Image (spheres, grey):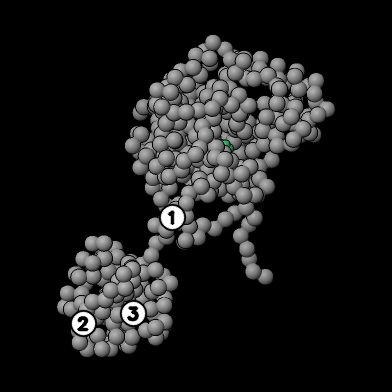
Amino acid sequence: MEIKAIRGFNDILPEEIGMWQFVERTAREVFEGFGFSEIRIPVLERTELFARGIGEATDIVEKEMYSFLDRSGHSLTLRPEATASMARAYLEHQLHAFDPVAKLYSIGPMFRYERPQKGRYRQFHQIDAEVFGVGNPMVDAEVILMLLHFLKKVGIGRLELQINSLGCRACRPRYREELKTFLMKRSFQLCEDCQRRLETNPLRIFDCKVETCQETIADAPKVTDFLCEECILHFNKVKEYLEMAGLDYILNPKMVRGLDYYTRTAFEVVSYQLGSQNAVTGGGRYDNLFQEIGGLDIPGIGFAIGMERLIALLSKDKKFIPHPSLFIAALNGEAQREAYRLANQLHLEGIRAELDYEGKSLKSQMRKADKLKARFVLILGEEELKKGRPILRNMEDKSQEEIPMENLLGILKDKILRD
Ligand code: HAM
């Protein structure tokens, strides 16, 4: 039986890779321009990091992690997100000793055992950016500005920025209690999972997709009505800085995000072109995460962009599909040797040239050049070789010209690199 890929794990094929490379290249350019440096973290971590970082009573930790015991009996987990790992690395390597402020980004695969559907996979990719060590609301607005600038640069419009404040250790417990009391009275309308969540983590009920739960929570008290003075001040400043940067936003008091580490600012960027899995990016502030994973009292804020969802929004632009600059159609043994020599020289110059390895007819080689969408074809037939003048055909305007063999490489380079 043919072996197939695991459900929810996708191949990214050569015809799609141009788009991925373009997105990654743009992220690096934009983020580095904002003073961020790349960090690469392992895909496997101790389970405890995510259990403590993301929170035991979240869907991710309760149901979605790929966890297993290694051969020494340690519980390990394929990372479901990058923030906790980046915080661990910052602490472990004492990056704060050099400068407490670190602006870091990371790109790579994440793993969650969710039910696969369009826009939701079990292996997916994130572009993640984090600022550690700054509590100032100016940075909240700055990372959002960087994110929206990046999304604009890759060519995505018609997005909506939604923001909320989730309060802090001082004010959230009171909100949690208020929410719990409200929901207790209506618990018979909640699904089984949410009845359990009511005890363990009532805020998570906002994320439930069950219709009756959504209806029940619709009139629930709003977190923003329970913020303490400092959280109100922080949120007002974030809004002020966003306005200063000319950014539009929508207040969404129901957006609580699926991870427990958030404090104060939470945000999402959604696209209505995406269907039910419409969040392209999620992020927020997490001023207690470092303490949760056993570290210092360090504030942090960041976001993660879902690459599959982002790429689904990009137009399938032709320029991302790599085509050969030249196809060398060679007919006999001697011409083939010449084609091989020439192709190698061009490759060393970084010019993509293709040739036929199977001794096919000229007609079939021209068909192949056409299929590959080569920009030029160099025809090296017996006649051309005898005359020492191969023919260069421009596949776009169909014009042809003879090229002297003596300076073939120079002329080809000139033509190919010129247009
Ligand atoms: P998240 O909301 O869980 O946040 O994920 C961020 C983004 O990753 C989502 O908006 C979505 O685009 C994408 N994503 C999540 N799960 C899947 C999936 N199963 N299939 C495809 N795409 C998916 C975090 O992961 C936080 N670490 C973000 C963050 C960084 N907060 C602060 N810093």
Residue drawn at 48 percent across, 24 percent down: 299
Asked if residue 10 is positioned above or below residue 193 in the image, the reply reads: below
Residue 366 visible somewhere in the drawing: yes
Residue drawn at 52 percent across, 13 percent down: 230
Residue 131 visible somewhere in the drawing: no
Q: What residue type is labelled 2?
A: Arg
Task: Determine the CA span between mark 3 and mark 1.
Answer: 28 Å
Q: Name the residue under label 1.
A: 317
Q: Mark 2 points at which residue?
A: 389
**Where residue 360 appears, x then y in whole percent?**
41, 84
Task: For the C terminus, give its image quadrant.
Answer: bottom left
Q: Nearer the viewer, residue 260 or 118?
A: 118
Q: Nearer the viewer, residue 101 or 68?
A: 101
Task: Rate crowding at label 1 as few (under 14), some (14 to 19) or many (20 or more) other CA atoms within 10 Å.
Answer: few
Task: Rate crowding at label 3 as few (under 14), some (14 to 19) or many (20 or more) other CA atoms within 10 Å.
Answer: many
Residue drawn at 50 percent across, 28 percent down: 249
**Where residue 290 appears, x then y in whole percent?**
52, 27
Task: Determine the CA span between mark 1 and mark 2.
Answer: 37 Å
Task: Determine the CA span between mark 3 and mark 2.
Answer: 14 Å
| Left or right: residue 36 compared with residue 378 | right
Asked if residue 298 is positioned above or below residue 3 in the image, the reply reads: above
Of pointers 1 and 2, the one earlier in the residue sequence? 1
**Where residue 212 appears, x then y in whole percent?**
77, 32
Q: Name the residue under label 3.
A: 329
